[in-house]
């Protein structure tokens, strides 16, 4: 019973859906205020979601209907599942085993693949270009993102998020060594979330809405929810990996601290996407491989040295 | 499919990158552009023909609506041509007021362009900021003329409204704000890394190509060609004012951005001078209703480049022929050249960099059958009948509805 409550209601599916809609509102509001606009009211993401659910689903006749309908569901389920493996404000998560970092990575990569499949099988020209860009981009940001997160795991000497939380609770100030990794992962996360400057797959002035061009109604609602939840899961993961403090305090305080950490990361994302222009796909790839990957290697080197000296 | 040479994607006539309908058919190989086919003709309004059926005074208001952004440019250009035919000596004060409105319009047009350019490269913050500041100049235009666009300032023989002392002061105050903001935009455009990355080296048009393809306005000036009607063939009060023609040698989209933001400062300078030296006297002289027979060609440096109007009068109160060449028509040929070997991602900003105004530039296109080369022109009634038949064949028939409507109206 307890586990079911945990999975379905709190902090499982129901919580994450409402939490991600709230986060979308906060992101949009900060973005708007930084741009000197008023921004949406607090219920806007929820209203959009309900409106889209009520709209007609249109499946293009030229598309492959099975793949076209499957993609949003695949994307949504995989990001929600990823959420269950991450410790939130305690050192323990619902599911945990040695190697769950890899599972979370895998589950976070699936939506990108689903976007590709959905866009490709919708057969729209814009969607096809968007899908190809989606995959091209995957090869650029995935490596620095994983290296950034794994460097932190390397210091903790574990493949499990739960044990990582335990390690950093035992060694309180060690997270300070990973701040470079945090910067790298945050920038790579922008690529995963398809936000400016890496919103190349859905650059509206070039390819309309990229992979999502042909989607409408319920399926578009799911896809948008997927992006919101991906943003939450991504920032929760970064919050755990790079700010793993206050995990064994009073649950109420811990929850507040957890919210603060997520809000901090979300506001950084909003700020970053306010101050830059969209890059071209070739510039994005060379940026990721020329700057982010070497920096991530440096972070790993630092952590290896620390492991050999401090933790001896 | 994605890599085959005939992978063509349509940018337009309906596309989020375009603010007006226009068709760009882009042949792609991966992300690379192999070729672009441009087709005009989606927004033709028949203004030249309509002008022949209206009186000269009515035509001013019609021609002002050629373009929503450079409305004053077109109206002034037309009025200048008519004044030349009629041999009217326009009072100096009117010429100065025309200059002031023209430069305010340039400021509003360039700020608008800056925002659009920001949007095309995914930098929406720039769009929001520059359009916010554009409100300052729009408000000033509204206080002077009563309208935010389509000012209705010109009349044959002068202008319709005077600028009084409080208005002059309001303009000066607004200019102070605008100059400060413009300096900030110059800083952004020349220092922000992602902007430079997206703009420099994109859409290169060499000096030779400018001369060969006859580009005008900021597009030409960004390639180091000092081409500006305000200096080459001064009209209004420009001969008495001192200002620099901004040129740049980058020859790419970055250069065009720099030229435009720097021109904002020059415009402020011109307005300050014009307000300081504003001569006293009447603002208009009475023009005859019938313009004597003759013809004239008038040139005007619109924000987008050289605007040319040709008017032929035949001694009646209506012109015999009006011909408009908007600056975009001169620049649009260059776009095809600029896009050669670029990426799809550069397409929106390269098109936007000429600051296109498609509805101003639209021509009537006679469709030719490819095989026979036979052009077919049909009149309005035939087109109407054709559309009724076309819909009937597809099961849509409005005849009963029309009958019902007629009966109801008759009752």
Image (cartoon, grey):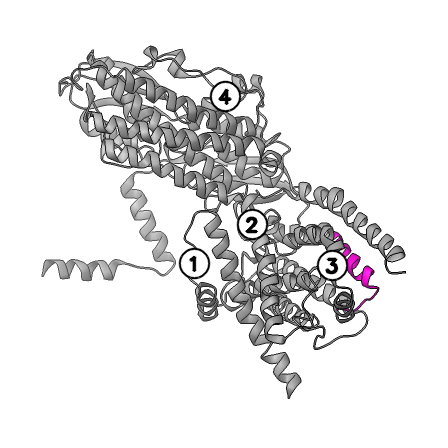
Q: Residues within 10 Å of mark 1 (few under 14, many from 20)?
A: few
Q: Secondary structure at mark 4?
A: helix
Chain ID at mark 4: B
Left or right of B365, for residue A105 = right
Kindly identify which residue carries mark 2: A271
> Left or right: where does residue B96 sit relative to residue A31?
left
> Residue B268 versus residue B196: which sits nearer the camera?
B268
Q: Nearer the viewer, mark 4 or mark 2?
A: 2
C-alpha distance separating marks 4 and 3? 55 Å
Q: Which residue is mark 4?
A: B220
Do the residues indicated by labels 2 and 3 lie within the same chain of the protein?
Answer: yes
Chain ID for label 3? Answer: A
Q: Quadrant of residue A259?
A: bottom right
Q: Give the vertical position of B325 relative to A45 (above or below).
A: above
- Residue in front for this viewpoint, A12 or B24: A12
Camera-nearest label, 2 or 1: 2
Give the SS element for disc 3.
helix
Q: Who comes first in sequence, dot 1 or dot 3?
A: 1
Query: Mark 3 = which residue?
Result: A175
Residue bounds of the magenta highlight: A142-161
* Mark 2: few/some/many CA within 10 Å (<14, 14-19, 20+): some
Q: Residues within 10 Å of mark 3 (few under 14, many from 20)?
A: some
CA–CA distance in space, label 2 to label 3: 23 Å
Res A13 seen here: yes
Tag count: 4
Disc 1 secondary structure class: loop
Foreground mark, 1 or 3, reads 3
């Amino acid at each position: 019973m307890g586990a079911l409550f945990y999975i379905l209601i709190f902090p499982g599916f129901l919580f994450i859906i409402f939490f991600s809609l709230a986060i979308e509102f906060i992101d949009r509001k900060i973005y708007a205020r930084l741009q000197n606009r008023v921004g949406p009211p607090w219920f806007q993401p929820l209203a959009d979601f309900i409106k889209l659910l009520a709209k007609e689903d249109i499946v293009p006749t030229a598309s492959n209907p099975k793949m076209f309908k499957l993609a949003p569901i695949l994307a949504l389920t995989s990001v929600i599942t990823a959420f269950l493996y991450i410790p939130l404000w305690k050192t323990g998560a619902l599911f945990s085993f040695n190697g769950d970092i890899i599972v979370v990575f895998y589950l976070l990569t699936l939506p990108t693949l689903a976007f590709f499949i959905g866009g490709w099988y919708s057969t729209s020209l814009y969607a096809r270009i968007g899908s190809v860009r989606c995959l091209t981009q995957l090869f650029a940001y995935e490596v620095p993102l994983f290296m950034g997160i794994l460097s932190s795991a390397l210091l903790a000497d574990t493949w499990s998020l739960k044990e990582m939380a335990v390690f950093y609770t035992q060694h309180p100030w060690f997270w300070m060594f990973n701040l470079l990794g945090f910067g790298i992962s945050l920038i790579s996360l922008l690529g995963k979330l398809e936000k400016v400057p890496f919103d190349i797959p859905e650059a509206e002035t070039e390819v309309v809405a990229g992979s999502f061009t042909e989607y409408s109604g319920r399926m578009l609602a799911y896809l948008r929810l997927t992006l919101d939840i991906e943003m939450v899961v991504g920032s929760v993961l970064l919050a755990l990996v790079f700010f793993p403090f206050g995990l064994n305090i009073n649950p109420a305080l811990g929850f507040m601290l957890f919210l603060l950490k997520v809000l901090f990361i979300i506001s950084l994302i909003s700020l970053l996407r306010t101050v830059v222009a969209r890059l071209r796909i070739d510039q994005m790839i060379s940026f990721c491989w020329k700057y982010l990957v070497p920096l991530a290697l440096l972070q790993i080197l630092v952590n290896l040295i620390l492991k050999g000296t401090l933790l001896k | 499919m994605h890599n085959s040479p005939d992978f063509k994607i349509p940018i337009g006539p309906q596309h989020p990158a375009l603010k007006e309908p226009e068709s760009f058919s882009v042949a792609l190989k991966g992300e690379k552009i192999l070729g672009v086919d441009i087709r005009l003709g989606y927004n033709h309004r028949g203004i030249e023909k309509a002008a022949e059926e209206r009186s000269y005074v009515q035509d001013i208001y019609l021609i002002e609506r050629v373009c929503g952004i450079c409305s004053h440019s077109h109206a002034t250009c037309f009025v200048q041509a008519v004044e030349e035919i009629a041999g009217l000596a326009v009072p100096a004060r009117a010429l100065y007021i025309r200059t002031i409105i023209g430069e305010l319009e340039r400021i509003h047009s360039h700020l608008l362009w800056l925002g659009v350019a920001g949007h095309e490269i995914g930098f929406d913050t720039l769009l929001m900021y520059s359009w916010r500041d554009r409100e300052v100049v729009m408000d000033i235009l509204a206080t002077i003329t009563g309208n935010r666009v389509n000012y209705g300032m010109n009349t044959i023989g002068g202008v319709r409204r005077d600028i009084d002392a409080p208005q002059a002061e309001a303009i000066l105050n607004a200019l102070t704000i605008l100059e400060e903001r413009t300096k900030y935009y110059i800083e952004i455009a020349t220092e922000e890394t992602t902007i430079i990355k997206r703009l420099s080296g994109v859409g290169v048009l060499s000096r030779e190509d400018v001369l060969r393809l006859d580009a005008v306005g900021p597009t030409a000036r960004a390639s180091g060609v000092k081409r500006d009607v305000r200096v080459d063939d001064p009209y209004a009060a420009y001969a008495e004012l001192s200002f620099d023609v901004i040129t740049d040698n980058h020859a790419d989209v970055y250069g065009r951005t720099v030229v435009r933001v720097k021109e904002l400062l020059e415009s402020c300078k011109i307005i300050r001078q014009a307000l300081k030296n504003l001569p006293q006297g009447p603002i208009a002289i009475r023009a005859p209703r019938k313009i004597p027979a003759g013809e004239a060609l008038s040139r005007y440096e619109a924000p987008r480049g050289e605007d040319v109007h040709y008017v032929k009068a035949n001694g009646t109160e209506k012109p015999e022929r009006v011909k408009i060449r908007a600056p975009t028509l001169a620049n649009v040929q260059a776009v095809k050249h600029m896009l050669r070997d670029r990426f799809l991602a550069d397409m929106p900003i390269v098109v936007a960099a000429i600051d296109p105004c498609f509805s101003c530039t639209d021509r009537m296109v006679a469709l030719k059958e490819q095989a026979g080369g036979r052009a077919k022109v049909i009149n309005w009634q035939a087109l109407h009948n054709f559309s009724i038949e076309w819909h009937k064949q597809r099961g849509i028939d409005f005849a009963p509805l029309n009958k019902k409507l007629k009966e109801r109206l008759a009752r």
